[in-house]
Image: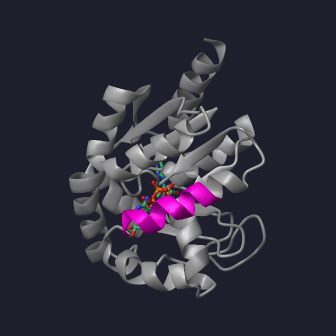
């Protein structure tokens, strides 16, 4: 299966992608995670992306499309789940062209729907593990020991772009540039909207229901 998870910042894309990966054995290709790795390695791409990410703007399409095509090429499996990409209509068109060149296409697009106020509460409370990438929340999804990762005991950290000011910019960017991507897939693909303001397990059940139905069809 080739999937896309769409949704606002903090809708739960990363959280749900990790569960999809575990259940359906698909590689999780997150544009945000790849950019953060590049930034940590101080690569040229990471250096170019930093300023955009810090302000909540999008990194230019040409950099992202090349980076994500490279990530898809590296996977040894036929399927994948894309998280955070595509994020503009132009990125969607480029992705379609790239997949079409090898007679492939996107099978399912899951669009996580959520209000800005819920997003703000979620993102400012998010903490993540710098070692394994596990994601927690200071109220909704607490680790067993405060501030410590359940998996490897590392100290949890807050992302630098998770401040209220930057989140407001990320939301503005989302409404202006990424919401039209959902419209693109309504015209060109198989998209389903899923309410993302419910409990994590309830959202997972709804997503798995859609994916199971697709596999059986
Ligand atoms: P990216 O890393 O993709 O960030 P994002 O899209 O803003 O999404 P987040 O990672 O913040 O949220 P999420 O939906 O994964 O939520 P999560 O599961 O963590 O991008 C960062 C930056 O990189 C961008 O701003 C841009 O500059 C650049 N970039 C990336 N891709 C790009 C592209 N294609 N083009 C151009 N630029 C690009 O959940 C959030 C919190 O809520 C967690 O604490 C979690 O525990 C909690 N939570 C999750 N689900 C629930 C639930 N159901 N109930 C209660 N709490 C929940």
Choose between 90 and 51: the one closer to the eye: 90
Give x and y (percent) for residue 105.
54, 33
Asked whether residue 180 appears in the rendered view, the answer is yes
Let me know if residue 17 is in the magenta part.
no
Q: Is residue 12 left or right of residue 182?
A: right
| Numbered range of the magenta stretch | 60-70
Q: Position of residue 135 (x, y in %)?
A: 59, 62
The front one of 105 and 87 is 105
195 w.r.t. 53: above or below: above
Tell me what residue is drawn at x 71 percent, y 74 percent.
Answer: 131
What colouring style does the render use? one colour
166 lies left or right of 46: left
Q: Residue furthest top?
A: 217
Q: Is residue 174 above or below residue 124?
A: above
Left or right: 41 as drawn, with respect to 206: right
Across the whole image, how many numbered discs are drawn on residues? 0
**Residue farthest to the front, as pictured:** 101
Q: Position of residue 29 (x, y in %)?
A: 61, 54
Residue 68 is inside the magenta segment: yes
For image coordinates 31% across by 70% down, the residue present is 57
- What is the quadrant of the N terminus in the image? top right
Picture quarter containing residue 14? bottom right
User: Which residue is depicted at the point 36% across and 33% down?
Assistant: 185
| Quarter of the figure with residue 145 | bottom right
Residue 174 versus residue 118: which sits nearer the camera?
A: 174
Quadrant in which the C terminus appears: top right
State whether residue 208 is above or below residue 173: above
Residue 137 visible here: no
The image quadrant where one finds ligand 1 is bottom left
Q: Main secondary structure of the magenta part?
A: helix
Task: Say which residue appears at 57% left-offset and 23% top-offset.
Answer: 209
Q: Tell me where residue 77 appears, x and y as whole percent.
A: 75, 42
């Amino acid at each position: 299966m080739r999937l896309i998870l769409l949704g606002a910042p903090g809708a739960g894309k990363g959280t749900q992608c990790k569960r999809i990966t575990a259940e359906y054995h698909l590689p999780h290709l997150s544009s945000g995670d790849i950019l953060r790795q590049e930034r940590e390695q101080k690569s040229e791409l990471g250096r170019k992306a930093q300023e955009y990410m810090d302000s909540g703007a999008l990194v230019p399409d040409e950099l992202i499309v090349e980076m994500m095509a490279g990530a898809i090429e590296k996977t040894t499996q036929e399927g994948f789940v894309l998280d955070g990409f595509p994020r503009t209509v132009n990125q969607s068109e480029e992705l379609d062209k790239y997949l079409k060149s090898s007679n492939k296409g996107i099978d399912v697009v899951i669009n996580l729907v959520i209000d800005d106020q819920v997003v703000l509460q979620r993102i400012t409370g998010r903490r993540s593990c710098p070692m394994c990438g596990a994601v927690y929340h200071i109220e909704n999804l607490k680790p067993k020991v405060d501030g410590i990762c359940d998996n490897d005991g590392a100290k949890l950290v807050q992302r630098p772009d998770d401040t209220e000011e930057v989140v407001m910019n990320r939301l503005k960017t989302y409404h202006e540039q990424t919401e039209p991507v959902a419209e693109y897939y309504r015209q060109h693909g198989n998209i389903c909207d899923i309410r993302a303001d419910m409990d994590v397990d309830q959202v997972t059940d709804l997503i798995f229901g859609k994916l199971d139905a697709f596999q059986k069809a």
